[in-house]
Amino acid sequence: MAPEAKKADSKTFPVKLLKNYRPVGEFLIEDAEELREPTGDELAKVPAGSVIHLPIDEARAIVGKKIADRNDAIA
């Protein structure tokens, strides 16, 4: 069954992963300009290079630790 496309929540922030990462809470993955739920493998580890939408606090923390870069219009 294919994952459904989701709409970005205003409380999430897009980041591009520089390293493999396992998000702490819920997140969405940007795939071909659409957001989707993560697959089983992605729940365990999201590969570097992926664009994911995280809660703002988690996104701020991993950008500060150089695990990800901002992926918004002003980055």
Image (cartoon, rainbow, N blue to C red):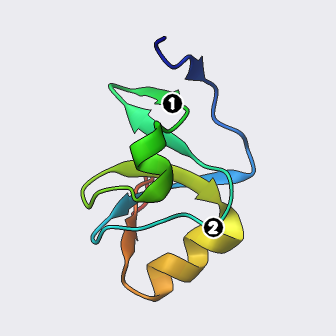
Q: Which mark is first along the chain, 1 or 2?
A: 2
At 50% from the left and 50% from the top, the residue drawn is 43
Relative vertical location of residue 7 with respect to residue 21 in this rendering, above or below: above
- Foreground tag (2 vs 1): 2
At 24% from the left and 56% from the top, the residue drawn is 49
Amino acid at circle 2: Val
69 and 48: which one is in front? 48
Q: Quadrant of the C terminus?
A: bottom left
- Where disc 2 sits, the SS reads loop
**Residue 15 screen position, x and y as percent:** 44, 59
At 41% from the left and 68% from the top, the residue drawn is 21
Relative vertical location of residue 51 with respect to residue 74 in this rendering, above or below: above
**Residue 55 screen position, x and y as percent:** 68, 59
Write down the quadrant of residue 19 in the picture: bottom left
Write down the quadrant of residue 18 in the picture: bottom left
33 and 42: which one is in front? 42
Amino acid at circle 1: Leu
Total residue callouts:
2
**Residue 8 screen position, x and y as percent:** 63, 35
16 and 41: which one is in front? 41
At 46% from the left and 13% from the top, the residue drawn is 2
- Where disc 1 sits, the SS reads strand
Write down the residue under mark 2: 24
Q: Residues under labels 2 and 1: Cα distance? A: 18 Å
Relative vertical location of residue 6 with respect to residue 13 in this rendering, above or below: above
**Farthest residue, direction bottom:** 65
**Farthest residue, direction top:** 1
Mark seen at residue 35: 1
Local crowd size for mark 1, using a 10 Å CA cut-off: few (<14), some (14–19), many (≥20): many
